[in-house]
Amino acid sequence: MAFWLMKSEPETFSIDDLRKCPNQTERWDGVRNYQARNFMRQMQIGEQIFFYHSNTKIPAIVGVAEVASLAYPDPTQFDPNSPYFDVKAQIDAPRWSLVDVRFVEKWSVAVSLTALKTLSTLTDFALLKKGNRLSVMPVSDENWHTIVQYAQALARQARA
DNA sequence: GCCAACGTTGGC
DNA sequence: GCCAACGTTGGC
């Protein structure tokens, strides 16, 4: 089982929006980057995802979601009315894929990008690499557990 | 196949 | 709102 991180701008689609979806599940549409697409094509049902809020006042991992489908063609690429429409995409040769994503939990205390940068135990974390713009990326087992434990510690502190 | 121009991402 | 970093496009 692999672990992942997916970015979303909360003004567009936040973790609260995901929680309110039918079955708390939604298509992760609009990814138009080949590397990110390829990662989604590797995803297996049930794999865990950090839900990251980007391009906002406090960029942060705000909770956990899970992969709810294998990758399939993103329907918005064929829809001329969608902002994600792609003229070059053909029905019989789709360019873009997506997976369904299901809400798992929202953390009581988010783990901010600033906080992540202070975690010296994180190794080779793509999110922290300079100039990183990838919206879907793998997370190593070690980094996943480090961050989850840190989030739990923050939650305990907040309760105390 | 190179690379300049352009558009986008996303932290600050 | 700024701008650095990056990916994509298209002329040659």
Image: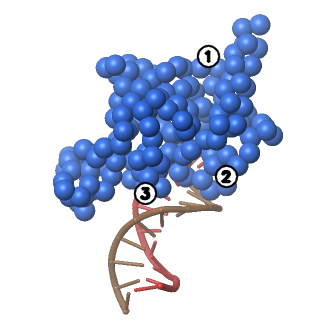
Chain colours: A blue, B red, C brown
Residue A129 location (% of width, % of height) = 67, 52
Residue picked out by circle 1:
A108
Of the numbered discs 2 and 1, the one sitting upstream in the chain is: 1
Residue A153 found in image quarter? top right
Q: Residue at x 60, y 53 (%)?
A: A132
Asked if residue A17 shows in the view, the reply is no
Residue picked out by circle 3:
A34
Q: A151 or A93: which is nearer to us?
A: A93
Q: A57 or A53: which is nearer to us?
A: A53
Of the numbered discs 3 and 1, the one sitting upstream in the chain is: 3
Residue A139 location (% of width, % of height) = 61, 41
Label disc, if present, on residue A129 of the rendered structure:
2
**Tag 2: residue type?**
Lys
* Mark 1 neighbour class, 10 Å CA radius: few under 14, some 14 to 19, many 20 or more: some
Residue C4 location (% of width, % of height) = 65, 62
Q: CA distance from mark 2 to mark 3?
A: 19 Å
Q: B3 or A99: which is nearer to us?
A: A99
**Tag 1: residue type?**
Ser
* Mark 2 neighbour class, 10 Å CA radius: few under 14, some 14 to 19, many 20 or more: few
Task: Check the residue under mark 1 and report the chain it is in.
Answer: A
Q: Residue at x 56, y 25 (%)?
A: A63
The mark closer to the camera, 2 or 3, is 3
- Pointer 3 with pointer 1, Cβ within 8 A: no
Q: CA distance from mark 2 to mark 1?
A: 26 Å
Identify the residue at the far right of this view: A120
Secondary structure found at label 3: helix
Q: CA distance from mark 3 to mark 1?
A: 33 Å
Task: Check the residue under mark 3 and report the chain it is in.
Answer: A
Same subunit under labels 3 and 1?
A: yes
